[in-house]
Image (cartoon, rainbow, N blue to C red):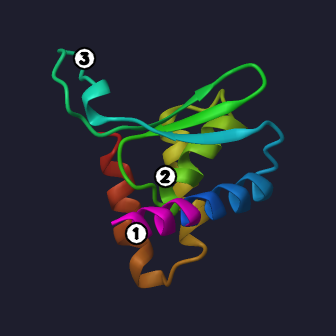
């Protein structure tokens, strides 16, 4: 279990460095895993999954309750790079950036999954 966690953390750190550079993010960004029991829905139900970024004046932190994917990191870093963008704009650009790296047959299915996040 520990080896898998370390490998996942290493992969996430790699993606964070890679995409921070590609998106020209100049402030430090860290990742912090949190318990699902610290996350609640608007109606107070605890035990929820979360991936989200908090921007501070000089730094940002990606909080997460589950293993991060490359898509998660690109999405959250776009929020850091473009704080004025709406969620729809971030979803659109996440799909656009990542689809350029995927075979065409997977692009449409992936875009559909990202758009469902908005619904």
Residue 4 numbered mark, or none:
1
In the rendered image, residue 105 lying in the magenta stretch gets the answer: no
Q: Are marks 2 and 3 in contact (CB under 8 Å)?
A: no
Which residue is tagged 3? 42
Residue name at image x 54 percent, y 70 percent: 99
Extreme residue in the front direction: 2
Which label sits in the foreground, 2 or 1? Answer: 1
Camera-nearest residue between 115 and 47 = 47
Left or right placement of residue 26 versus residue 47 in this view: right
Residue name at image x 59 percent, y 76 percent: 101
Could you say where residue 9 lies in the image, as x and y percent from the top left?
52, 59
Characterize the local packing of mark 3: few (<14), some (14-19) or many (20 or more) Cα atoms within 10 angstroms.
Answer: few
Residue 90 numbered mark, or none:
none
Could you say where residue 70 lies in the image, as x and y percent from the top left?
52, 62
Left or right placement of residue 57 versus residue 119 in this view: right
Could you say where residue 41 lies in the image, as x and y percent from the top left?
24, 23
In the rendered image, residue 3 lying in the magenta stretch gets the answer: yes
Quarter of the figure that contains the N terminus: bottom left
Which label sits in the foreground, 3 or 1? Answer: 1
Say what secondary structure mark 1 lies in.
helix
The magenta segment is 1-10
Which residue is tagged 2? 72
Characterize the local packing of mark 1: few (<14), some (14-19) or many (20 or more) Cα atoms within 10 angstroms.
Answer: few
Q: Are marks 2 and 1 in contact (CB under 8 Å)?
A: no
Residue name at image x 34 percent, y 60 percent: 112
Say what secondary structure mark 2 lies in.
helix
């Amino acid at each position: 279990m520990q080896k898998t966690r370390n490998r996942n953390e290493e992969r996430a750190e790699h993606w964070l460095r890679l995409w921070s550079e590609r998106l020209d993010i100049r402030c430090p960004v860290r990742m912090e895993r949190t318990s699902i029991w610290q996350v609640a829905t608007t109606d107070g139900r605890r035990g929820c999954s979360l991936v989200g970024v908090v921007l501070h004046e000089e730094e940002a932190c990606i909080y997460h309750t589950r293993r991060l994917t490359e898509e998660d990191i690109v999405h959250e870093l776009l929020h850091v790079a473009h704080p004025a963008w709406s969620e729809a704009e971030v979803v659109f650009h996440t799909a656009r950036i990542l689809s350029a790296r995927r075979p065409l047959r997977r692009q449409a299915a992936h875009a559909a999954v990202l758009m469902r996040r908005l619904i």
